[in-house]
Amino acid sequence: MDLRNIVILTGAGVSAESGLATFRGPDGLWEGHKVEDVATPEAFARDPALVHDFYDARRAKLGTVEPNAAHRALARLDAEWAGELLLVTQNVDDLHERAGSKRLIHMHGALTKGWCLRCNERFDWAGPMGGAAECPSCGTSGMVRPDIVWFGEMPYDMDLIDQALRDCDLFVSIGTSGAVYPAAGFVQTARYCGGQTLEINLEPSLGSYMFDESRIGRAGELVPQWVEELLQSAHSRPMSR
Ligand code: OAD
């Protein structure tokens, strides 16, 4: 089959080798917190200072880490792949864009964005946000929250992602445990619509049995290998435009 349209899903595992913690570590805590204490609208309503502190610390950490070989390989694929390509990340870090990926969706939002609950604008954000942040659009203070999709909220761009999954010839899942829907269900949509499916992860994910192929190991090693293979095979069998 001619391979033309690719959808790639990434999770916390792709950033682990850059030094960012994954969500479901052995202790079940995310940087010392239960996910429901920092990643739900209820947590923000109950204790906004705690939630702001948590995300301010995550945002500050971005300045201390760099994209790794997996991010760079995916950016190379984006630049060199002549067919359709969509990189969907669940990660709120900015390492894919810093590596150079362009065809990218942050389905769970981004640490580098803020959202004003007064005027509903979303905007770039650098540095601490805290509870008194002023909206650059309407000027209101204290109504800005991190533009992060919390549990119980709708991920971004689902229509676009769903269409890309239906149209894809290959779906690749990298560094995600497959524990959180709707992302964990992407493999089923791609399969159902006839796409090949590959997972690259440190261990078999929860939905591993749904993939045609699993490559088990570090993303920093396996993703560059896979990208090289894919580009080599495309060069030896050019796509018709
Ligand atoms: P998880 O922490 O659930 O899973 C990370 C996966 O990456 C695990 O299966 C690890 O085995 C794997 N992994 C770790 N290091 C790796 C490496 N070097 N190379 C390859 N794989 C590696 O993180 P996610 O699946 O991304 O949502 O979590 C999904 C969502 O749950 C997050 O986006 C977040 C969270 O709660 C929200 O905040 C809404």
Image: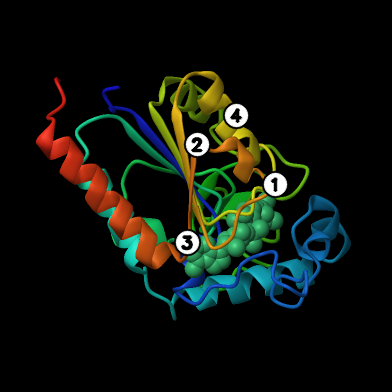
Residue under circle 4? 188
Which one is closest to the eye, mark 2 or mark 3?
2
On the image, the x and y values in percent for residue 14 come to 47, 61
Q: Nearer the viewer, residue 174 or 180?
A: 174
In the rendered image, the quadrant that contains the N terminus is: top left
- Quadrant for ligand 1 reads bottom right
In space, the residues marked 4 and 2 are separated at their CA atoms by: 11 Å
55 vs 192, left or right, is right
The residue labelled by disc 3 is 14
Residue type indicated by callout 4: Gln
Q: Are marks 1 and 2 in contact (CB under 8 Å)?
A: no
Q: Quadrant of residue 141?
A: bottom right
Which amino acid is tagged 2?
Answer: Asp
- Residue 180 circle label: 1
Q: Tell me if mark 3 has few (under 14), some (14-19) or many (20+) residues whose alpha carbon lies within 10 angstroms of its own.
A: many
Badge 1: residue crowd in 10 Å (few <14, some 14–19, many ≥20): few
Q: Is residue 6 left or right of residue 41?
A: left
Determine which of the numbered discs, if any, sits on residue 212 in the image.
2
Under 8 Å from ligand 1: the CB of mark 1? yes
- Mark 3 Cβ and ligand 1 under 8 Å apart: yes
Answer yes or no: do the residues labelled 4 and 1 have beta carbons within 8 Å? no
Mark 1 is on which residue type? Val
